[in-house]
Image: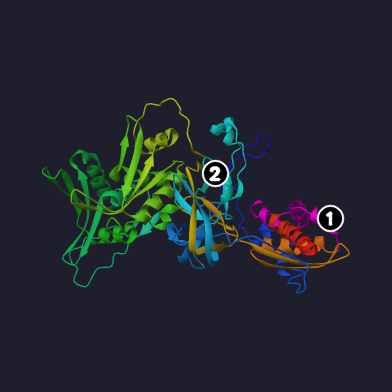
Amino acid sequence: MNTKKCKKKKCATKSCPKKVEKPITATSFYSKKVMDLFQNPKNVGEIKDFDGKGVVGNPACLIKGSFVQANFELTEIENIQPSKNVLSHDGLYHTVNANAKTNFSGKTIELKNQLGLTQLTPDHEIFAIKLPKHESFLRNKFKKTIKAEWHPASNLDKGDILLYPILKETRDRDFIPIDLTKKKFDFKSKEIPNKIKIDEKFLKLAGFYLAEGHCILKTTKVHLGFSFALDEQEFADEVKLFVKEIFGIETKERKNIKHNTISLAINNVFIARLFNDLFGKGAKNKKIPEFMLYLPVKKQSALLAGMWLGDGFFNKKIPRAGYSTISPVLVNQLKTLLLRQEISPSIYVEKEKKVNGVNHKQSFRIHVGERNSVLKLASILGIKLKVTKEKATRSWFNENYLFTPITGKTIKSFNGEVFDIAVNESHSFATNSLIAHNCGDIMELTIKVEKNKIKDIKFKTFGCAAAIATSSMITELAKGKTLEQALKITRGDVAESLDGLPPIKMHCSNLAADALHAAIEDYKKRKKS
């Protein structure tokens, strides 16, 4: 059993079992009453000769083309199929079980922060902190005291705080097996170890390859190469040392004074094949293998160091740092690495352009400028910085999230396809910039009234287990009540009658109460006319 030293003063033992997180299931997420009413709902249907009808809720959707964090890549929401895994508010990946599409015409909300922007329908709920309109809440000290909740996008404003999840799961790995199969007439390839240790040296070498490496796998020419500037001799020397110590292979070096370059060549088919299979080739197609994104944070710092030293910059005078790549996959994976190190990135997209007759492909830039983040990155890169006086920062971390302000809110007219995905267990998903609830519930209640009492009531609901359970419960609570008594039923009454709801699902009880109140108001209007 894994044990760790117990930090509790009153604990009599010197060590205690490490807490094992149980997987979230529907039965552990919801109370027994919720599950019973979800599986066996009461009063389902529609009263044909109803006296009042209440319809509440809107499809909570993202516009076509919106990005969702799926399998460590940003994928357009319309291309996310059931069985794909998406990052959720709990920092874990959960499986998608449905993707709903509908047409929408109306106003949408575009929210922007340092990670990017997301455009969605006004009722889509976002995990955020809604700040009071008070001067003291201009400082993070007071912002941190407010609990994050689910808010409709339309209720959020510039300056309110969006949360973004940090990947929580860690899977360590010690070795990578190497395929030493030779082609039929290959008599020259020097063999290397049949497995490679995943340590600081190999991970930093991998980072250098992702930044400065290339791979050629032609029959007549097979090698792994690196290119550095003449003033980066120390990095070239590190690569040569790592290749020798890890693989037992010598690296050839060539300098070109005219072009200010140092070229390194590792002429070994097994090494070239390994790096090609793990990381891809060509600047646009490079990526970090999934298992490396789950490695312990301390190990990942070596990978991050190699990438940044090879292809990033660090200005010690300001100080600030940046990284640029044309790989959309790599920039998103680098975001994952930075967030796990509690380094706050700002991400920008530079469109394809032509400058002085030279074509520049679309590129992605990461900027790190906030004091604490710069200090952490400097430590990883081995750069000594003079500790400056702490300045006010816009963003902050806890162990689960990056908290970052909304920097722009735009209301746009939209007419076209919108999408929402249903996510098992967590009921949420991360876009490129925020956390969205996955539930676009629509509830319809019809009532039959006699002598000022609700004689009959039925519901039809499109939504999750909580939406169906709360709809069923509201009909039970309202049936037989006078209209005045029914109007006093609150979302708290609904949740309490179900033995509680998870915080992420409390809006469902609000929707159920709203549907009942809307049906009663509709009855009163019909009676007057």
For the question of whether residue 249 can be seen, the reply is: no
- 419 left or right of 350 in image: right
- In the rendered structure, which disc, 2 or 1, sits on the residue that comes first in sequence? 2
Answer with the quarter of the image where residue 391 lies.
Answer: top left
Answer with the quarter of the image where residue 516 lies.
Answer: bottom right
Question: Circle 1 sits on which residue?
Answer: 484
Residue 42 versus residue 174 in the image, above or below = below
Residue 235 placed where, x, y %? 25, 42
Asked whether 484 falls inside the magenta stretch, the response is yes
Circle number at residue 500: none
Asked whether 116 falls inside the magenta stretch, the response is no
For the question of whether residue 84 can be seen, the reply is: yes
Q: What is the crowding at mark 2: few (fewer than 14 residues within 10 Å), some, or many (at least 20)?
A: some
Q: Magenta: predominant secondary structure element?
A: helix
- Front residue of 486/66: it is 486
| Mark 2 touches mark 1? (CB < 8 Å) | no
Question: Circle 2 sits on which residue?
Answer: 157
Please tell me which residue is depicted at 67% across the width and 58% down the height of the picture. Answer: 28
Please tell me which residue is depicted at 45% across the width and 50% down the height of the picture. Answer: 117
* Amino acid at dot 2: Asp
